[in-house]
Amino acid sequence: MLERVVLISLIYFSLFFFDMTKLIKKPRIEIYLYIFIVMISLYLSLKFVFELDWFNMYDLIAVLIGKMAENIVDYLNVIP
């Protein structure tokens, strides 16, 4: 687990270090979008580092398009 913490810390430190100079000059909407994407990646990083059984992206996709995907598969299912 220590290796994961060091790796994620190094990634986020370098991300913020190199992006802060460019982010200051950007419009507000781009800054908000950047923060939103970083928050999602931080959530997934915490899930990875601590091996938590939290809500995953696959669960979100299953909720959003799961029934529609099942209907498509049922429609395309060919019985010989």
Image: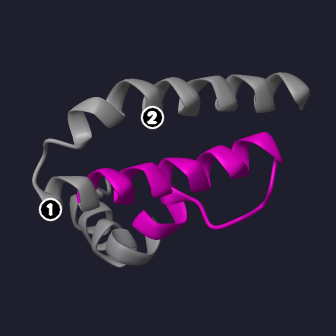
Distance between the alpha carbons at the discs numbered 1 and 2: 18 Å
Q: Which residue is drawn at 36% across and 60% down?
A: 36
Q: Would you say residue 51 sits in the magenta stretch?
A: yes
The residue type indicated by label 2 comes to: Phe
Query: Few, some or many C-alpha atoms within 10 Å of disc 2 (few <14, some 14-19, many ≥20)?
Result: few
- Secondary structure state at the residue bearing disc 2: helix
Q: Which residue is drawn at 89% across and 32% down?
A: 1
**How far across and down, in percent of the image, does residue 27 sit?**
10, 54
Prevailing secondary structure of the magenta residues: helix
Q: Which residue is drawn at 38% across and 24% down?
A: 18
**How far across and down, in percent of the image, does residue 59 sit?**
53, 66
Q: Which residue is drawn at 45% across and 34% down?
A: 16
Left or right of 10, for residue 72: left
Q: Mark 2 — residue?
A: 16
Q: In this picture, is 20 found above or below 59?
A: above
Mark 1 and mark 2 lie on one chain; the one further toward the N terminus is 2
**How far across and down, in percent of the image, does residue 17 sit?**
45, 27
Closest to the observer: 46 or 12?
A: 12
Closest to the observer: 79 or 7?
A: 7
Q: Would you say residue 40 sits in the magenta stretch?
A: yes
**How far across and down, in percent of the image, does residue 26 sit?**
13, 46
- Secondary structure state at the residue bearing disc 1: helix
Q: In this picture, is 37 found above or below 65?
A: above
The residue type indicated by label 1 comes to: Ile
Q: In this picture, is 36 found above or below 18?
A: below
Mark number displayed over residue 29 = 1
Q: Which residue occupies the extreme right position in the image?
A: 2
Q: Give the range drawn in magenta.
A: 33-61
The image quarter containing residue 72 is: bottom left
Q: Which residue occupies the extreme left position in the image?
A: 27
Left or right of 37, for residue 39: right
